[in-house]
Amino acid sequence: MRALKNEVFDNYRYIIIDTHPSIDLLLFNSLQAANYYLIPMQAEADAFDGLEYMFDCVRSLKKRNTQLFCLGVVITSFTGKGVHKELYPIIQKFLKEKKMKIRGVVPWSSVPARASHDRITFTESSNPNWRKVRDAYQELADALAKDLIGTRQGQARSEEHTSELQSPDHL
């Protein structure tokens, strides 16, 4: 990743490295090469339990990559009911204590999985239910792009410069 970073990364403004949801060598290598990271998680007990472990791993990585900064957490597959509704304020409080925040909430939908199965982007899907998911991701992308304007690689952003995204009440 270091060789890739030196050889390729300078040719792009943003590169997104999407890893699978486990703390393993791929995640460690990706975070070594990264300047910023965003944590997607579901509002579920197992994901919440793993959050502290994720922070511990990142703390150890920051010894080697001092230019690694967190952009926040994105709640994915959010239904707004049951355990999701109960855990959301707990996650929000936990992140506030860590001086982090929820950057976006993406509603649950079967459309992304179906689009993946059909080998199309979910924005190309003919399913009318994709709109809320697409709009949530677009809102997140717009806010992150706005926050990163004028930043250099590995430059921390102060809290007052980060955009606050909608709460899950709109879902």
Image: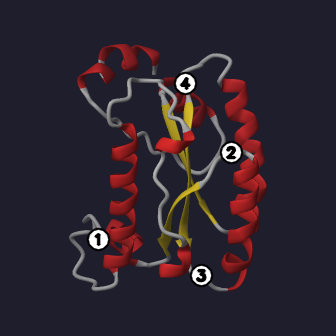
Label 1 – label 3 distance at C-alpha: 27 Å
- Evaluate if marks 3 and 4 touch, with contact meaning CB atoms under 8 Å apart: no
Residue 114 appears in which quarter of the rendering? bottom left
Give the amino acid at mark 2: Lys
Label 2 – label 3 distance at C-alpha: 24 Å
Numbered disc 1: secondary structure: loop
Q: Considering only order in the chain, which callout, 4 or 1, is on the residue closer to the N terminus? A: 4
Whether 98 is drawn above or below 79: the answer is: above
Front residue (pair 65, 22):
65
- Evaluate if marks 2 and 1 touch, with contact meaning CB atoms under 8 Å apart: no
Q: x%, y% of residue 169?
A: 54, 80
Give the amino acid at mark 4: Gln
Give the amino acid at mark 3: Gly
- Evaluate if marks 1 and 4 touch, with contact meaning CB atoms under 8 Å apart: no
The circle on residue 118 is: 1
Q: Residues within 10 Å of mark 4 (few under 14, many from 20)?
A: many
Q: Residues within 10 Å of mark 1 (few under 14, many from 20)?
A: few
What residue is at 67 percent from the left and 76 percent from the top? 84
- Evaluate if marks 1 and 3 touch, with contact meaning CB atoms under 8 Å apart: no
What residue is at 61 percent from the left and 53 percent from the top? 101
Q: In this figure, which residue is indicated by the disc labeled 2?
A: 99
Q: x%, y% of residue 42?
A: 61, 65
The circle on residue 32 is: 4
Instruction: Give the tally of numbered discs.
Output: 4
